[in-house]
Image: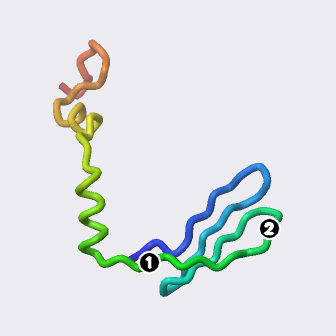
Amino acid sequence: PVVTAVRLGTKDGEIVIDRPEGPLATLSLPGQPSRTLALKVRSTSELIAEELRRLDADEMYAVALRGENGTKETPRHV
């Protein structure tokens, strides 16, 4: 599965990038004519490599694993 459209609601209207298939997308901005954009279709390996380059520590996940909840109270289920 791939993302084929992104919609962002603003006070002036919706900003939409729609790419149902292939490298051509349509950019729609409120009050402006739609434009066609060429967007590279990237391979799965390129997408994974990008995600791994930006991989940061997930602090909230670490807190959850340690069982910390930010309070001094003992949970009722313990």
In the image, is residue 27 above or below residue 30? below
**Mark 2 is on which residue type?**
Gln
Which residue corresponds to the image point at 46% horizontal and 72% vertical from the top-left? 3
Which numbered circle lies on residue 71?
Answer: none
Which numbered circle lies on residue 32?
Answer: 2
Q: Residue furthest bottom?
A: 22
Q: Separation of disc 1 and disc 2 at Cα?
A: 24 Å
Which numbered circle lies on residue 40?
Answer: 1
Q: Residue furthest top?
A: 72
Element marked by disc 2: loop
Query: Residue 33 location, x and y as percent?
Result: 78, 73
Query: Residue 17 location, x and y as percent?
Result: 60, 70
Quadrant of the image occupied by residue 51: bottom left
How crowded pointer 2 is (Cα within 10 Å; few <14, some 14-19, many 20+) is rated as: few
Query: Residue 22 location, x and y as percent?
Result: 48, 87
In the image, is residue 62 above or below residue 14? above
Tell me: 47 left or right of 2.
Answer: left
Which residue corresponds to the image point at 41% horizontal and 75% vertical from the top-left? 2
Tell me: 58 left or right of 34.
Answer: left
Quadrant of the image occupied by residue 47: bottom left
In the image, is residue 46 above or below residue 63? below
Element marked by disc 1: loop
> Could you say which is closer to the camera, residue 22 or residue 61?
22
Q: Which quadrant does the C terminus fall into? A: top left
Which residue corresponds to the image point at 78% horizontal and 62% vertical from the top-left? 30
- Indicate which disc, 1 or 2, sits on the residue closer to the N terminus: 2
> Could you say which is closer to the camera, residue 35 or residue 30?
35
> Could you say which is closer to the camera, residue 42 or residue 67?
42
